[in-house]
Image (spheres, helix red, strand yellow):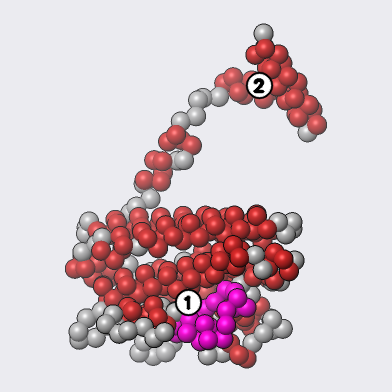
Amino acid sequence: MEDKEQIKSQISKLEEKYKDSGQDLSSYLDGLLYQRYLTYWDYIHLDTLLSLQVPRTHFPDEEIFIMYHQITELYFKLILHEQKQLVDDKSDNLNFFIEKLRRINSYYTALISSFGIMIKGMEREQFLQYRMALLPASGFQSAQFRMIEIYATPLENLVHVSDRSRFSSNHSVEELYEHIYWKKGATDLSTGEKTLTLKQFEYRYTPRLIRIAKQVKGSTIYHKYVSLPKAHKENGSLIEALKTLDVNANINWQLMHMGSAHRYLRKESGDIEATGGTNWKEYLPPSFQKIVFFPNLYTEQELNNWGKQWVDHLFNPDKKTEK
């Protein structure tokens, strides 16, 4: 009897819901009656997902390469999903802010820890052969990673370190974007001209990235933090979460890529170019780029030494870290 009363109550609520939107509940009930049961594989489009790996060569490890990059892009999408909620939030709720940062950091932790698949999970000989069939495609062309950076911090913090002192928030988005740090990493090693990899990327994504930068101007995650009440800004858990995001995105993630590049692209007679012709030895080291999302959280000395100890450890593992 109690179950029947509950069903009647639920139907009554549904009638009100559809009535308020000018819809007929009876039609929706007919649809429910004829609808097939949902399955797991249909819900996540499993067959489609598993069909998206299309190698260009016969080398078995190329499929690993494809799948790992697809997994990475899905994690980037998760990060952006949380960032957008933070940027759009108007509540200044401290717990909400910390929880979103915690989720973002958990995604980065999974990404960073999983990168061993790329470093040790493929045969170097296979990689050096099938990579030639991928030209000029490059992970450099990940638009989602660029979006993550734009949502996180003001565009002036992403200007190349050699030009950064000349720019501020007073400059236009277009001016700042023209001097963004990663463009200098996609220059041809022999001529200094833009690589085809960069030209392709700019043609496809520049309008979209500039549009996003304009949308979040003054309301990035950095700005959200700065605008918080003083008591919130001094919260230890929040500061730790922001610093962890900085280290994850701007040091540890690049460091893992450097480890991969060293394994596959370094040789005694001279380094091998990346697939997009990017200057990876100048582009990847975090101590060279000094990209910091939340610079006001660090001392001048910390900013000057940004990422240095990690790079020293990678290139000079026997060298003692200066204290």
* In the image, farthest residue toward the top: 1
**In this picture, residue 214 sits left or right of residue 145:** right
Residue placed most toward the observer, 187 or 299:
299
Q: Quadrant of the C terminus?
A: bottom left
Question: Residue 162: image x %, image y %?
Answer: 53, 90
Q: Is residue 307 above or below residue 92?
A: below
Q: Amino acid at mark 2?
A: Leu
Q: Give the x, y percent position of residue 104.
A: 53, 59
**Residue pictured at 35% horizontal, 55% vertical:** 67
Magenta residue span: 287-306
The residue drawn where x is 34% and y is 52% is: 53
Quickly name the residue at label 1: 199
Kindly identify the residue that appears in the image at 59 percent across and 56 percent down.
100
Q: Quadrant of residue 33?
A: top right
Q: State the CA–CA distance, disc 2 to disc 1.
A: 53 Å
- Residue drawn at the location 45% of the way across and 69% of the way down: 141
Q: Can you identify the residue that label 2 sits on? A: 29
Crowding around mark 2 (Cα neighbors within 10 Å: few <14, some 14 to 19, many 20+) is few
Q: Quadrant of residue 272?
A: bottom left
Give the answer, above or below, for where 132 lies relative to 34. Answer: below
Q: Residues within 10 Å of mark 1 (few under 14, many from 20)?
A: few
Residue 111 falls inside the magenta stretch: no
Left or right: where does residue 166 sit relative to residue 319?
Answer: right
Task: Give the numbered dot on residue 314.
Answer: none
Q: Is residue 147 above or below residue 177?
A: above
Q: Secondary structure at mark 1?
A: helix
- Give residue 204's position: percent from left, percent from top: 52, 68
Q: Is residue 305 magenta?
A: yes
Q: Amino acid at mark 1?
A: Lys
Residue 180, relative to residue 68: is it above or below?
below
Taking the image as shown, residue 317 lies to the left or right of residue 136, namely left
